Image (cartoon, rainbow, N blue to C red):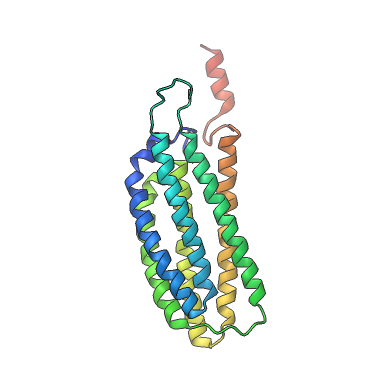
Amino acid sequence: MGAGHGHGHAGARHRWRLAVSFVLIGSFFLVELAYGLISGSLALMSDAGHMAADVVTLGAALVATRIAGRPDTTGRRSYGSYRAEVFASLLAVVLMLGVALYVVTEAIGRIGGTAEVSSGPMLVVGAIGLVVNLIALLLLRSGASESLNVKGAYLEVVADTAGSADAIVAGWLVSTTGQAFWDTVVALAIGIFVAVRAISLGRQVFAVLGQHVPEGVDAAAVAADLAAI
């Protein structure tokens, strides 16, 4: 999170980065979902579920940056519309928690089962996903420190990058051991990781909504400076 609560102009500056990331991840989501269903891999399907959260979140982030950048012609919004970005970040938290809950539930349900998993598509799709996510990370990295909205999207992609790497590991383990159990283990790890990231972002979002003192600001020093005026 940046030093202040107003991130509207910062988000608007990075709108094109959000747009390119939206197209990249949205396109790959369809590919990963299809191959996840074909291969029977829960790791791929869980990563596709998180990709879906990314797509919705990036779309909401794009809308939020446009709303936040609109001038107040009525004079009634003294703080502008910048908090729209914060609500987009809150949406990211809700979606990430939903995906995490689904993945963990499905993984637990598969424990002890005999599901068949094809490792070939897992390796190929996981590798492609890793490249797509790395590109999106590079695009969003500079804006993550300036806008809570962009940071929410960035953290989504961070989790997805780990998910793609985990899918590659799962595919390799299934291929070398012949045990589909590893797909379930990796999917469970992805779900837990996504939940942790969501909780971290959620704490920052509620800090803004609760109008807490921004990180890096000494409230006592500010009060002393104001008293000295």
x, y percent for residue 7: 44, 36
Q: Residue at x 37, y 49 (%)?
A: 18
x, y percent for residue 94: 58, 51
Q: Is residue 216 visible?
A: yes
Furthest toward the top, the residue is 229
Q: Residue at x 58, y 68 (%)?
A: 189
x, y percent for residue 221: 55, 24
Say left or right for 54 vs 213: left
Above or below: residue 49 compared with residue 8: below
Numbered marks: total: 0
Q: Residue at x 59, y 74 (%)?
A: 185
Furthest toward the front, the residue is 74
Q: Residue at x 57, y 79 (%)?
A: 182
x, y percent for residue 222: 54, 23
Q: Is residue 146 visible?
A: no
Give the quarter of the image for residue 64.
top left
Above or below: residue 105 compared with residue 228: below
